[in-house]
Image (cartoon, rainbow, N blue to C red):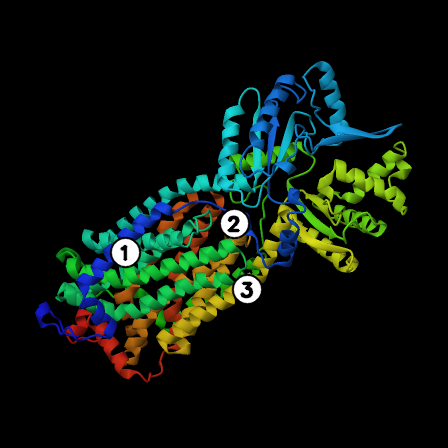
Amino acid sequence: MKIVANPAEFNQHTGNTLERLIFNNRSWVLLIFLLVTLTSAWQLRELSVGASFDKMLPHDHPYIENYLENRDELRGLGDSVQVVVENPDGDIFDPEFLEHFANINDDIFIIPGVDRAWMKSIWTPVVRWVRVTERGFEGGPVIPGDFDGSPESIRHLRENIARADVVGSLVANDYRSGMIVIPLLPDADYYAVSKALDEVRAKYQGDDANIYIVGFAKLVGDLIDGLFKVMSFFLAAVLIAAVIIFSFSRCLVSTSLVLGCSTAAIIWQLAIVTYLEQPLDPFTVLVPFLVFAIGVSHGAQKMNGILQDIGKGNHKMVAARYTFRRLFVPGVTALVSDAVGFAVLMIIDIPVIRELAISASIGFGMLILTNLVVLPVLLSYTGVSKTAADRSLRAINHRSENRGLGSLALLTERKWAVRALSVAVVLAAGGLVVASKLQIGDLDQGAPELRADSRYNKDSSYISEHYGVSNDLFAVMVKTPSQECGSYRALVEMDRLGRRLSSVPGVQQTQSLADMVKLYTMGSFEGNPKWLTISDNAGLISPQISTALAWNSEMLNRDCSVMPVVAYLSDHKAATLERVVDEAAAFAEAHSTPDLQFLLAAGNAGVEAATNMIVRESSRIMMLCVYIAVGLLSLIVFRSWRAVVVALLPLMLTSILTEAFMVMLGIGMKVATLPVIALGVGIGVDYALYLLSVQLTQQRLGVSLRDAYRSALRFTGKVVGLVGVTLSAGVVTWVWSPIKFQADMGLLLTFVFLFNMLGALILIPALSHFLLRKPAKTENAKQDRSAGEAVRSTDPRMIQGETL
């Protein structure tokens, strides 16, 4: 391609159809861009922030299908919040404290989204005491309707609490606090519930009461509150990217356009997400950050190409068209690879992951339009400053080829290639050993999404220390035909399952209808402990079932056909859940019949166990699909299977090391970290596409491997390094996020971006020495010659007739 300083001398009919359509109608392209951006910005008025418990459920998993099928029968085992009210100056038997406790209970009762029929505390009528007298069973609410706070009433309250057996569950072991268990309706607005609970806490927290709140809805509320703080990191990412890009280009106009087009892609993406009625949640809010960072990386490549062409003497419009010709196909392929890396997450049957995949794929699609099409058009009008163009040209003309990035060309020689690959093999072997210890699910107590010193985790720690059972519930649902829950066989099998689960490490205690029947049977015989058993006499069992329905209806439904066997777990760590699931599943398989089914699993721990299983099953399939998709896209661009191997092996090394890094950081493989692994492959191949597309073009024109790779370094390599640093700098700020899983993702993404960059720059020339020393000639030689001329046109020494 010749130097064209006067645009009137440029043949407008050259280039492919897409190039002519875009650049011969530049004003229309910019007008459409402006209208779409303004319309999208207006659409953002409807953008909402929220989260849903159901979106976290793997709906096609058998455990979750069982839970959803029976959720209406046993609502108390669904999603719930626990509020603990502590008397800081005494115990709960203080009349003034009890009044505060009652007011808090009443305020919570009217919060929209609360399943009031199943709400439990010593102030709710469903929590009752029962005792055996010579006249039979007697009982009533723990706090009767005529309670007046008098010493006599307090004495009766002490007795009722003991009779109700709620110490350790609704009353603390030290009697200094009481708990309110708040089941939520399936359509509850979690953020609204969380804010309402915060208002209750603000109203009553003080000298008279300390309030502690845990539960998924509260966790979601804290995460969303953290999101608003995370928004400040977007500004930090913009500033960091601006500084790095400007320090490279020394052109304020082109830097502003790169940042502006990347921001426009985010506006377009969020507008489409809003139109699809998908709210931002703690997991998908990171997508705009990634879209911006990746947009900046591709924009920098386009800006660099135009800088070089203008520096050589081309007119700004001609420079923009030349750059479009050279980099549009690698850029599109790279962004499609990024999108595929996320789109493959669709195979994971968790709605929040699928929404993240859709949102990210939309964002990368928008970048194709804004950063690969609109940015070159904008730069064709504005160009770059003369200082920036001259500086870029001087950098290319610099003859110290064995300094800086140019020294990496030595890796195309056998001695250095062997050394680099030997180090890579050692790292891969060590990484595989460490990565083999990667666990699925949460590895810490409390809420791992938040920091250990967060208020939520402090509240969780207090509750765990002062109550006999945790809020981590794993339930097996027992189903019988209608009115058959009281059969002798069903009760015996429930009792056996409860005893089996109670022996599993990590299970604090179990509870089931069988326990209630045994207790009530003993009560029917004057409390004689010899009758603490399940009788085979239907006449003895039937009254106890009626009593259970009246006094403890959460242990069975009204149809007497669904009963939970509940295990209270010490934590929700992956290892604990695995032990409980293995024991419960083995029992269910051995003891289930058509008329007596043991169905896993309900309770928050049951849901998390199912999620862990989906993550375990899907993670390897997901990675295989990502690599296959990226490999096929690379094959289309490179037209060489050897080049595909050269491109993918550095990505595989980074994947291995990322999993090893997760083990060292104590991060498990879960919903929040799966996208990082997929993203590492999708984005990592960008570097290979930009480097190898130039290297292979030069080699197919007869240039030696060393000189071809040096040409790739001059043209796109330095921007690859710039991009790696820019991406890493943009996400490393997340380390200071109040949301721990976002901080963890920031660390992981920083690691992934840097190692992908280093792997591409170091391993591509080393692998090329063994696989691409003599690339096969392609059938489309004309296209190769055209591309080669485009690349040579960026190197002034080629223009002057010099060899590389």
Q: Residue furthest top?
A: 151
Residue 9, compared with residue 607, is above or below; it is below
Q: Mark 3 to mark 1: distance in Å?
A: 39 Å
* Label pair 3/1, CB-CB below 8 angstroms: no
| Residue 618 or residue 79, whichever sits in front | 79
Q: Amino acid at mark 3?
A: Arg
* Label pair 2/3, CB-CB below 8 angstroms: no
Q: Quadrant of residue 718?
A: bottom left
Apparent side of residue 630 relative to residue 347 in the rendered image (left or right): left
Neighbours of disc 2 within 10 Å: few (<14), some (14-19), many (20+)? few
> What secondary structure is found at the residue carrying circle 1?
helix
Neighbours of disc 3 within 10 Å: few (<14), some (14-19), many (20+)? few
Q: Which mark is residue 620?
A: 3
The percent coordinates of residue 506 (x first, y second) are 69, 45
**What residue lies at 83% left-to-right and 40% top-to-bottom?**
544
User: Which dot, 2 or 3, sits closer to the camera?
Assistant: 3
Any part of residue 717 in sight? yes
User: Which dot, 3 or 1, sits closer to the camera?
Assistant: 1
**What residue lies at 77% left-to-right and 60% top-to-bottom?**
594
Q: Quadrant of the N terminus?
A: bottom left
Any part of residue 398 in sight? no
The percent coordinates of residue 345 (x first, y second) are 49, 61
Q: Quadrant of the C terminus?
A: bottom left
Residue 288, compared with residue 167, is above or below; it is below
Residue 530, compared with residue 207, is above or below; it is below
Q: Which mark is residue 36?
A: 1
From the image, tell me which residue sits under label 2: 665
User: Which dot, 1 or 2, sits closer to the camera?
Assistant: 1
Q: Quadrant of residue 646?
A: bottom left
Q: Amino acid at mark 2?
A: Leu
